[in-house]
Image (cartoon, rainbow, N blue to C red):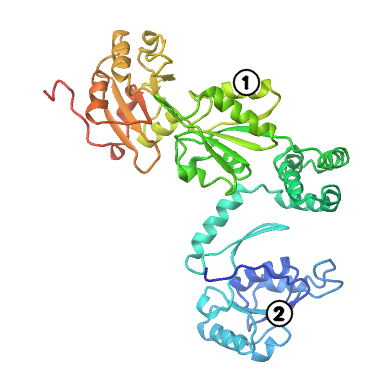
């Protein structure tokens, strides 16, 4: 770490700003927002800086009574300008002048920032996400300012606009909660439940009056003398790429006490969980069940009854061949609060990775998600009803029964030449996309040695696959001899 991160209190203090153009104006806006007073020195000063100076004194808690916000000096920089300043910012864009400002500031031990010149600066200003009083600074140490701005844009999109109001709301109750809950661990649990709960959501939605009434009732009624209530969130982790987690899934992972996860959950996704969260693997694969469904149900119930915030993390979407419904039913039957968070399912992820539209005018007016594996092998499905044209099939867990699936569909009237694609480990770095024809599906799976997790797509839309995403096409079995 090249720079030590810190936030400076500039309220009521004076900062020297050398420069009168747009870069200086950007710095001045931030300085004034932080409650600083600014002395601007430059031969030419632009209209925005002049307008800020003409705005005159401002009364307020940050700047003090009747304090001038901006003082202008229409001239060149002089070393004597540094006297009495809290820090100095050089924003002229003129190499010689900026270097002079830097040397003069360092000579008197004054912190200096030269815009876009980290080698001349003793401190740098980060890209800022401002949800006052919540402020986030992002820095690349001057290595890639554009990257810092892109990260800021990402965070701006992630964070609620009223996040600052939520922080101020919580601050107004800190003393009351501290008086009722002297134990630090219980207090952290209280606030953790608050920020994840309905009162915080009311503040974020703009209903601060209703939130305050609910908070007063909560504090007066419970205090945190009662043990915190546990909960379970059944969360879809998507196809495996951590960038495809939903924002809600990410938020729950970062607040969870316990994460119960399947075998399809990779380390990159688990890394998004809170570092001190307990992680429990209950992965199930064909013929290898680390934990039975009944055991998983009881595990979730046990931790929730212990007051823990539990995330049950499942690959794809928990309610598409993920048995999430069984877990929800069990928990609700025992009075446990359950939140349901969908995830990107394998059908949409695999199709998008291969550039295949699941529906397309003239080719497919319907799509059906179906399992290729039942409790006792082949599933009890009316394949003939699914064999019609203008229809895309997405087969989950179908590798071991690929031959039987093809036979059933062809017997039901689907043409042997219907295009098929097999997508394994969709969205991950080792993703594979293989294409062929329905009549050769078993041969395709066997000869390409395709391993799960994989999804089979069947239908005319497969012909629209992105050629750049595919491996070399496999010839028909008959042609292969």
Q: Residue furthest left?
A: 481
Q: Nearer the viewer, residue 385 or 333?
A: 333
Quadrant into which the C terminus falls: top left
Q: Secondary structure at mark 2?
A: loop
Measured from the top left, where is residue 299 in percent x and y? 59, 30
Residue 367 visible: no
Specify which label sits upstream in the sequence, 2 or 1: 2
Q: State the separation of the CA atoms marked 2 and 1.
A: 62 Å
Looking at the image, residue 262 sits to the left or right of residue 439; the answer is: right
User: Which residue is located at x 38 percent, y 21 percent?
Assistant: 392
Please, is residue 68 above or below residue 285 in the view?
Answer: below
- In the displayed structure, 45 sits above or below 268; it is below
Q: Is residue 305 depicted above or below 85 in this figure?
A: above
Residue drawn 52% across the image and 56% down it = 150
Camera-near label (2 vs 1) is 1
Q: Which residue is mark 2?
A: 86
Q: Residue 240 vs residue 463: left or right?
A: right
Q: In this rendering, does residue 11 appear at all?
A: yes
In the picture, measured across the screen, residue 374 lies left or right of residue 28, that is left
32 or 48: nearer the viewer: 32
- Residue 259 position, x and y percent, is 57, 38
Against 2, residue 264 (above or below) is above
- Residue furthest toward the right? 220
Residue found at x 61% / y 30%: 300
Tell me which corner region of the image, top left, top right, bottom left or bottom right, holds residue 113.
bottom right
Q: Which mark is residue 329?
A: 1
> Which element type, helix, strand or loop, lies under badge 1?
helix
């Amino acid at each position: 770490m090249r720079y030590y991160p810190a936030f400076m209190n500039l309220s009521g203090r004076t900062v020297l700003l050398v420069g009168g153009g747009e870069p200086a104006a950007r710095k001045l806006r931030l300085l004034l927002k932080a409650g600083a007073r600014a002395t601007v020195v430059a031969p030419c000063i632009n209209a925005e800086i002049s307008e800020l100076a003409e705005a005159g004194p401002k009364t307020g808690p940050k700047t003090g009574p009747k304090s001038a916000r901006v003082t202008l000096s229409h001239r060149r920089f002089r070393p004597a300008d540094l006297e009495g300043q809290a820090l100095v910012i050089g924003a002229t864009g003129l190499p010689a002048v900026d270097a002079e400002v830097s040397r003069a500031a360092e000579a008197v031990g004054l912190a200096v920032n030269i815009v876009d010149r980290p080698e001349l600066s003793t401190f740098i200003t980060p890209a800022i996400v401002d949800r006052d009083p919540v402020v986030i600074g992002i820095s690349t140490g001057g290595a890639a300012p554009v990257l810092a701005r892109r990260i800021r844009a990402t965070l701006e999109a992630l964070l609620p606009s009223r996040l600052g109001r939520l922080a101020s709301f919580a601050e107004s109750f800190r003393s009351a909660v501290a008086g009722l809950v002297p134990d630090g661990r219980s207090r952290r649990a209280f606030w953790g439940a608050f920020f994840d709960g309905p009162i915080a959501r009311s503040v974020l939605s703009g209903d601060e009056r209703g939130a305050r009434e609910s908070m007063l009732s909560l504090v007066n009624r419970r205090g945190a003398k009662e043990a915190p209530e546990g909960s379970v969130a059944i969360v879809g982790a998507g196809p495996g790429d951590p960038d495809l987690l939903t924002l809600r899934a990410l938020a729950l992972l970062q607040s969870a006490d316990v994460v119960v996860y399947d075998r399809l959950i990779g380390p990159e996704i688990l890394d998004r969980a809170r570092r001190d969260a307990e992680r429990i693997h209950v992965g199930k694969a064909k013929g290898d069940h680390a934990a039975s469904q009944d055991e998983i149900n009881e595990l979730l119930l046990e931790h929730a009854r212990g007051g823990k915030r539990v995330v049950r993390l499942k690959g794809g979407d928990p309610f598409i061949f993920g048995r999430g419904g069984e877990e929800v039913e069990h928990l609700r039957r025992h009075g446990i609060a359950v939140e349901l968070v969908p995830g990107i399912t394998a059908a949409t992820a695999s199709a998008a990775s291969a550039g295949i539209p699941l529906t397309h005018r003239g080719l497919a007016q319907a799509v059906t998600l179906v399992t290729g594996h039942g409790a006792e092998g082949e599933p009890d499905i009316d394949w003939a009803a699914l064999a019609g044209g203008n229809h895309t099939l997405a087969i989950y867990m179908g590798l071991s029964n690929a031959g039987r699936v093809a036979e059933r569909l062809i017997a039901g009237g689907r043409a042997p030449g219907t295009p098929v694609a097999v997508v394994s480990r969709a969205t991950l770095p080792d993703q594979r996309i293989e294409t062929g024809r329905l009549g050769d599906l078993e041969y395709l799976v066997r000869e390409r040695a395709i391993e799960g997790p994989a999804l089979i797509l069947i239908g005319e839309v497969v012909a629209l696959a992105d050629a750049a995403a595919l491996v070399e096409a496999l010839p028909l079995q008959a042609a292969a001899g």
